[in-house]
Amino acid sequence: MLKPLLVAVLLTGLCTPVAVGATAPPSTCLEPPVSDKNELCVDLLPYSGKEFAGYGRFVPTAKDAPDQLDVVVQQSRTMWPEPLTIAKKTVTGNGEISAVTDAGAISADATAVRACATGFVLTGSRAYDVCTPWQPV
């Protein structure tokens, strides 16, 4: 279930909850070449304690083709070489699509966390990826 702060944030059109006295970082968006106008953005949504969710939005140029958006939250741990996924959400649709993962708790030995989004047109062969910078925890 979405927490009240996240619901308020999504209803107002903002992407990242703002802590009291803090400024929300801008969304991390794909910067495609001039000839490619697909838009893909992702945000890391911190919760109280050690829980995080991800929010992603994909706006492809082909509005009538079926699209897919995958949003994941990953943690980096000291003893693991690869990032571990703690939350994931996949949605499909046509035109602009967005998704919010459930909140995932990071492990006690996590060193950093990030959110990533992958968007692609199901009839095409090109995927678009974007990730927020790693945030120390």
Image (cartoon, rainbow, N blue to C red):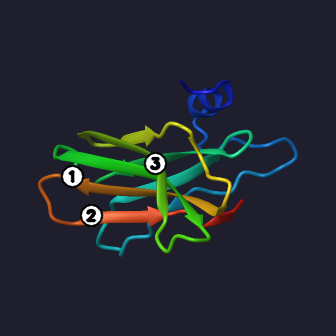
Residue depicted at x 66% and y 24%: 4
The residue identified by callout 1 is: 62
Which of the two discs, 1 and 2, labels the residue nearer the N terminus? Answer: 1
Q: Is residue 105 left or right of residue 96?
A: right
Mark on residue 127?
A: 2
**Amino acid of disc 2:** Ala
Residue 55 image point, x, y percent: 50, 45
Name the residue rendered at 73%, 39% in the picture: 48
Quadrant (top left/top right/bottom left/bottom right) for the C terminus:
bottom right
- In the image as oriented, which residue stretches furthest toward the right? 21
Q: How much space separates mark 3 and mark 2, taking CA atoms? A: 14 Å
In the rendered image, residue 126, in percent from the top left (x then y), is placed at 21, 66
How many neighbours does mark 3 have within 10 angstroms: few (below 14), some (14-19), or many (20 or more)? many
Along the line of sight, which residue is nearer the eye, 27 or 63?
27
Left or right relative to 62: residue 2: right
Q: Secondary structure at mark 1?
A: loop
Q: Amino acid at mark 3?
A: Gly
Mark seen at residue 110: none
Q: Who comes first in sequence, dot 3 or dot 1?
A: 3
Q: Looking at this view, is 96 or 35 the one in front? A: 96
Q: Quadrant of residue 6?
A: top right
Q: Position of residue 85 (x, y in %)?
A: 46, 54
Q: Badge 1, how many Cα within 10 Å: few under 14, some, many 20+? A: some
Name the outermost residue toward the left. 123
Secondary element at image label 3: strand
Question: Which quadrant, please, contains the N terminus?
Answer: top right
Residue 90 quadrant: top left
- The amino acid marked with disc number 1 is Ala
Q: Which residue is mark 3?
A: 56
Query: N-terminal of the two: label 3 or label 2?
Result: 3
